[in-house]
Image (cartoon, rainbow, N blue to C red):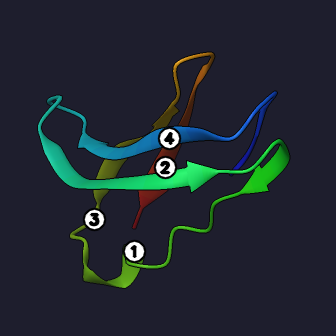
Amino acid sequence: MNFSVNAKAEAQILLLESTGKTVMQENIIAKPGLNIYEFSNGSRLPGGTYVLQISSSAESSKVKLIKK
């Protein structure tokens, strides 16, 4: 998932089940400009629909993931 910030900032990454339950949480330091987050733990998840959310003080982005 690509996201941008204007200045160095802490960002929170959440993986949520379709019920809203948090499956994974990670805090990262985002650099100014374009940042790329690669979710690599998908093989451990059971099939279903998930939401990957990245939030910083300036922006929030969500992407829907479907695991078969």
Asked whether the beta carbons under mark 2 and mark 1 sit within 8 Å of each other, the answer is yes
Residue drawn at x 48%, y 55% as measured from the top left: 28
Instruction: Kindly report the distance in space between the C-alpha atoms of the residues bearing marks 4 and 2.
Output: 23 Å
Residue 47 x, y percent position in the rendering = 27, 65
N-terminal of the pair, mark 4 or mark 2, is: 4
Name the mark nearer the viewer: 2 or 3.
2
Q: Is residue 38 above or below residue 50?
A: below
Q: Judging from the image, what secondary structure is the residue with disc 3 in?
A: loop
Viewport quadrant of the C terminus? bottom left
Instruction: Kindly report the distance in space between the C-alpha atoms of the residues bearing marks 3 and 1.
Output: 10 Å
> What residue would you read off at disc 3?
47
Quarter of the rendering containing residue 62 = top right
Asked whether the beta carbons under mark 4 and mark 1 sit within 8 Å of each other, the answer is no
Q: Amino acid at mark 4?
A: Glu
Name the mark nearer the viewer: 4 or 3.
4
> What residue would you read off at disc 2?
65
